[in-house]
Image (tube, rainbow, N blue to C red):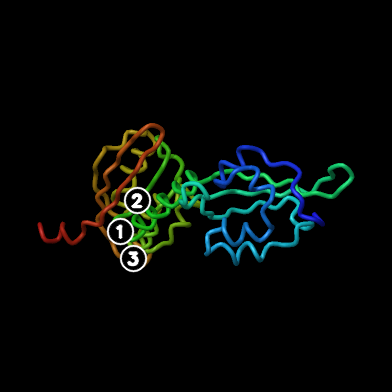
């Protein structure tokens, strides 16, 4: 810790950062922040506690690989240990680029779903556990998404009394039509007609709810 001398660097480390081992042993401490880190990560890196205070710390950084010159993501864990009577930092880097890319795609999809007029419900195949609800559910029901996530039975309380027995029976028998209509009572007391389409794949079920109240009125 005191001298920043490197005792051991493995081949995987070289591959992750894109620099040869003999070069990594010789580089100055500032090289990481000046050449390897992506420019928008420098402030985050400079805000880290001192080396002796990083024990147990795990951080993620975006870097520029020295070989392919592309952006990569790494997870770095720090552990303070003794080596040959000296206090040292054991630093382990792991390439998490694929994981971060999946996170970016997931967050983009969630953002798109939250902004649509339809309400999207992701549930287990038996529709007993709600895994995700788009924020757009609040525009449809007048209640925030967490009300439904925290209580799987809250949804049935929003169903219009005239349709509640039928919907409760669907839930009990697990025989829900792939497409159906029912009425709900919003938080403000307004009655709306909902059309839900259900798609099942593997262990999951996706319900797409659309408010068709105005469309029904036009037909009538």
Mark 3 — residue? 189
Cα separation between marks 3 and 1: 23 Å
Residue at left offset 30%, top offset 48%: 208
Q: Where does residue 150 sit, x and y in percent of width and height?
A: 51, 52
Where is residue 131? Give x, y as percent.
45, 45
Along the line of sight, the residue nearer the viewer: 19 or 121: 19
Percent from the top left, x then y, of residue 47?
A: 66, 66
Q: Nearer the viewer, residue 201 or 74?
A: 74
1 to the left or right of 44: right
Query: Circle 2 is placed at which residue position?
Result: 120
How packed mark 2 is, by other alpha carbons closer than 10 Å (few <14, some 14-19, many 20 or more), is many
Tell how many labels.
3
Tell me if mark 3 has few (under 14), some (14-19) or many (20+) residues whose alpha carbon lies within 10 angstroms of its own.
Answer: few
Which residue is found at the position 38% from the left and 58% from the top?
A: 111
Residue 46 figure quarter: bottom right
Cβ atoms under marks 2 and 1 closer than 8 Å: yes
Residue that label 1 marks: 116
């Amino acid at each position: 810790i005191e001298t920043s001398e490197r005792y051991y660097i493995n081949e995987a480390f070289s591959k992750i950062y894109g620099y040869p081992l003999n070069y990594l042993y010789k580089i100055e401490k500032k090289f990481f922040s000046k050449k390897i880190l992506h420019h928008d990560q420098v402030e985050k890196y400079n805000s880290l506690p001192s080396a002796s205070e990083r024990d147990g710390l795990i951080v993620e950084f975006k870097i520029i690989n020295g070989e392919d010159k592309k952006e990569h993501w790494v997870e770095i864990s720090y552990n303070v240990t003794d080596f040959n009577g000296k206090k040292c930092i054991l630093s382990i880097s792991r390439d998490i680029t694929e994981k971060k890319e999946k996170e970016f795609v997931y967050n983009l999809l969630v953002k798109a779903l939250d902004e649509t007029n339809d309400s999207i419900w992701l549930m287990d195949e038996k529709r007993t556990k709600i895994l995700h609800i788009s924020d757009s559910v609040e525009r449809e029901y007048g209640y925030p998404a967490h009300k439904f996530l925290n209580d799987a039975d809250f949804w049935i309380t929003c169903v219009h009394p005239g349709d509640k027995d039928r919907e409760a029976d669907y839930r009990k028998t697990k025989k829900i039509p792939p497409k159906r209509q029912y009425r709900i009572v919003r938080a403000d007391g307004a009655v709306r007609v909902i059309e839900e389409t259900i798609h099942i794949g593997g262990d999951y079920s996706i319900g797409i709810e659309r408010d068709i109240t105005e469309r029904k009125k036009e037909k009538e």
